[in-house]
Image: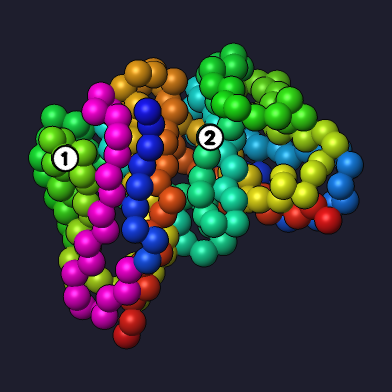
Amino acid sequence: GEDVEQSLFLSVREGDSSVINCTYTDSSSTYLYWYKQEPGAGLQLLTYIFSNMDMKQDQRLTVLLNKKDKHLSLRIADTQTGDSAIYFCAESPGSSNTGKLIFGQGTTLQVKP
Amino acid sequence: DTAVSQTPKYLVTQMGNDKSIKCEQNLGHDTMYWYKQDSKKFLKIMFSYNNKELIINETVPNRFSPKSPDKAHLNLHINSLELGDSAVYFCASSQGLAGPGEQYFGPGTRLTVT
C-alpha cells in the first residue's frame, strides 16, 4: 500500500536544530521529498533524495534516509522564525510513472524566539 | 512573474451550485495536477494531465471534471457542490512524469460551500 506518516507538531527555540520525521510504506519508492508550506501559500520543494542515497545535505538542511526501516528525516540546523511552516514528506511510488506523489499529513513547525 | 496561477483565490458558494476553478502555468511544463487539501491540511492528488492527456484520476466523484484546453491550462469544474467539497484546491505543474521532477504549486483556491 501507499501511506506516509508524520508527527503533527514540533516546537523548537530559535537557534536550535529541528528534526522532522516521516515513515513511508512503499519500499519501491524512487524519490522522497520534503515540501514546505507557509501560511496561505502553496507548497514549495525544499529538497529530495534518491532512494539509493542515505544522506543529502543542502546548506542548513540534512536529509537522512533509512531504507530498511522506511524512515526519512529532515534536520534544519540553526532554526529561524522564518522556518515556521508546515513541512510535508512525500514519496513517489515506484509502481507508477505518473508523477504521482503521496503526501504525509504535514508537521507544523513552530519556532519560538 | 507568476509561475502557477489560479483563479479565483477564494470562492464561496451554496450547495447544489456548479463552479469552476482555473489554473495556468507559464513554465512550459508538460504535466499539470489538481490536489485537494482538507481542513486538517491533508493533501491528496485528484487528477493529473500530461500533454493534455489524463494520466491520474484518483477516486474522485464524477461531479469533478478536469479540462485541459492546452498544456498551459488545467481547469477544474465541479457540479452540484456539497458541503464536503469545502477545501483548498491546489494546482501544480512539473516538467514530465519521470525523475525527481519538482512540482510547482499555485497559491490555492479556498472553496467554501454553505
Residue position for label 2? B45
Q: Nearer the viewer, residue B7 or B63?
A: B63
Relative image position of residue A57 (x, y in whole percent): 14, 50
Q: Nearer the viewer, residue A48 or B13?
A: B13
What residue is at 52 percent from the left and 39 percent from the top?
A: B44
Q: Quadrant of residue A36?
A: bottom left
Crowding at dot 1, Cα within 10 Å, few <14 / some 14-19 / many 20+, comes out as few
Residue range of the region highlighted in magenta in the rendering: A10-30
Question: On the rendered image, what quadrant is the N terminus of chain A found in?
Answer: top left
Residue position for label 1? A69
Q: Is residue B18 left or right of residue A51?
A: right
* Distance in Å between CA atoms under marks 2 and 1: 26 Å
Question: Which residue is farthest front?
Answer: A1
Q: How many marks?
A: 2
Q: Nearer the viewer, residue B105 or B15?
A: B15
- Kind of residue sitting beneath label 2: Ile
